[in-house]
Image: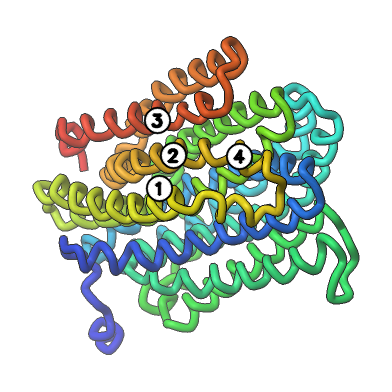
């Protein structure tokens, strides 16, 4: 026991640029690799035709709506683990992780059931094209079976980030990407001895990739001895009190993220009403959001972890300076990537193998999106600071207020006034300004300090 205690390190984090980057950079690498998967899927599917590329936009957003429950659970779990890390409470961290794994399987089962029973009705209601509708439903019936692997993977990521082992995330995501690219190449058009499964080949490839990522991350956790350090195998018994804490902390985030992506799905279905070209171009823009977004999300996840850890150390007065430090790093990185995309928009859009009309339609939208993502780099940091304080209900109310304004805007611009795609994508400016402003006001009000 004495040797084990001596082997432990102090889990309390310092407030410095070096500490921020040491957490954020591995998370960034871990997040950017799945975005490469999305782009790879779309490149292969774009080779099948414009309709398949358009359908990939709908199925991709829908799967994110279902899968985002795991993301909410991940962030809630990460907040609790980081708080315990700030207290250097190893046993509580291991217990929290095991209860999170168990809860994630329940969330996955609910997501699968909802997809099978609800998806056909939603697609019939929202999509005008019968071909797109049928293709999307068939794809999602396959794709949703990746949820158990994805959620286990996300809970393990929360454990690694919360205990300052984020560098090991890279191995899982790298393995996931290799499998995804190889199987996309093999299954969509039938290469390397595999059958040609067309559009559905991407679904099978993604499931295999998520399973691989899960196995590799769990192997890393075992290999570096974390189960022993955190008493994981000694604490596998069901703990209803702790499970309820994780559920209460995570549920507002699950609802927040689900509503946010559901509104995005609504946005995409309105675009589909105006033709396949607009939907196909908008799907590629989702990749731009993914590429730039991983910068924002990596710093946002770092904010969640560090704010919670600092509060666990009893240093609430350091929270706002920490947030501002992370915000400027996030914004600076985002501006750099945005400039590159704006200097070479044609080079990026041409990788999807579409015609000149596609590229000309996409260039002004690309410029619009990169501006809004700079706002996102600020807003996500402040919003995840709220998550780090544990006040996840505040996150939910901010999201509800913002989404009401967002949905009204996209309906008026696309359906009522038909102002075109550039104005439609202007909704991103509204969304991030509203959300970021409310999060900033809440943190600066100090209301989160009154109950730890």
Instruction: Tell me how far mark 2 sits from mark 4, CA to CA.
Output: 38 Å
Q: Nearer the viewer, mark 4 or mark 1?
A: 4
Alpha-carbon span between mark 1 and mark 3: 27 Å
- Mark 2 vs mark 3: which is more N-terminal? 2
Q: Which mark is residue 253?
A: 2
Residue 290 locus on image (x, y percent): 51, 50
Which mark is drawn over residue 429?
3
Q: Give coordinates of residue 316: x percent, y percent.
A: 13, 47
Q: Which of the two residues, 21 or 243, is positioned nearer the viewer here?
A: 21
How far separated are the C-alphas under marks 3 and 4?
A: 22 Å
**Residue 242 visible in image:** no
Q: CA distance from mark 4 to mark 1?
A: 42 Å
Q: Are marks 4 and 1 in contact (CB under 8 Å)?
A: no
The residue tagged with tag 4: helix, strand or loop?
A: helix
The image shows a total of numbered marks equal to: 4
Measured along the vertical axis of the image, is residue 265 above or below residue 245? above
Q: Residue at x 30, y 42 (%)?
A: 378
Side (left or right) of 125 relative to 352: right
- The vertical placement of 365 against 316, above or below, is above
Report the Cα–Cα distance between label 2 and label 3: 22 Å
Dot 4 corresponds to which residue?
A: 360
Q: Secondary structure at mark 3?
A: helix
**Can you identify the residue that label 1 sits on?**
76
Q: Quick one: label 4, few (<14), some, or many (20+) residues within 10 Å?
A: some
> Which image quadrant: the N terminus?
bottom left
Q: Give the mark nearest the N terminus, 4 or 1.
A: 1
């Amino acid at each position: 026991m004495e040797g084990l205690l001596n082997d432990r390190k102090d889990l309390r984090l310092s407030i410095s640029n070096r500490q921020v980057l040491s957490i954020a950079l591995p998370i960034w690498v871990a997040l950017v690799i799945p975005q490469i998967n999305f782009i790879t899927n779309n490149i292969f599917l774009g080779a099948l035709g414009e309709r398949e590329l358009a359908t990939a936009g709908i199925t991709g957003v829908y799967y994110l709506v279902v899968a985002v429950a795991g993301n909410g659970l991940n962030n809630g779990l990460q907040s609790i683990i980081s708080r315990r890390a700030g207290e250097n409470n190893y046993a509580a961290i291991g217990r929290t992780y095991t209860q999170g794994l168990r809860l994630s399987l329940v969330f996955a089962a609910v997501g699968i059931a909802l997809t099978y029973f609800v998806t056909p009705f939603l697609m019939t209601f929202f999509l005008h094209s019968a071909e797109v509708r049928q293709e999307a439903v068939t794809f999602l019936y396959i794709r949703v079976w990746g949820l158990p692997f994805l959620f286990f993977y996300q809970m393990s990521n929360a454990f690694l980030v919360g205990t300052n082992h984020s560098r090991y995330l890279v191995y899982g995501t790298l393995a996931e990407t290799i499998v995804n690219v190889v199987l996309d190449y093999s299954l969509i058009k039938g290469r390397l001895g595999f059958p040609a499964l067309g559009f559905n080949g991407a679904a099978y490839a993604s499931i295999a990739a998520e399973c691989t990522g899960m196995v590799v991350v769990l192997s890393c956790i075992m290999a570096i001895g974390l189960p022993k350090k955190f008493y994981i195998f000694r604490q596998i018994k069901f703990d209803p009190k702790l499970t309820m804490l994780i559920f209460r902390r995570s549920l507002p985030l699950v609802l927040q993220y689900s509503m946010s992506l559901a509104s995005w799905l609504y946005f995409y279905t309105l675009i589909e009403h105006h033709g396949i070209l607009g939907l196909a171009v908008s799907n590629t823009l989702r990749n731009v959001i993914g590429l730039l977004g991983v910068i924002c999300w990596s710093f946002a996840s770092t904010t969640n972890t560090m704010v919670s850890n600092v509060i666990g150390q009893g240093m609430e007065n350091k929270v706002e300076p920490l947030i501002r430090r992370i915000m400027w790093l996030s914004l600076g990185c985002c501006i750099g990537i945005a400039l590159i995309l704006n200097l070479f928009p044609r080079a990026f859009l041409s990788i999807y193998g579409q015609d000149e009309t596609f590229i000309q339609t996409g260039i002004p939208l690309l410029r619009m999106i990169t501006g809004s993502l700079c706002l996102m780099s600020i807003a996500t940091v402040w919003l995840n600071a709220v998550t780090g304080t544990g006040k996840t209900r505040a996150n939910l109310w901010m999201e509800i207020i913002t989404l009401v304004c967002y949905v009204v805007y996209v309906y008026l611009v696309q359906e009522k006034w038909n102002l075109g795609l550039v104005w439609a994508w202007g909704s991103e400016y509204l969304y991030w300004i509203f959300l970021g402003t409310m999060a900033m006001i809440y943190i600066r009000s100090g209301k989160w300090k009154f109950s730890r």
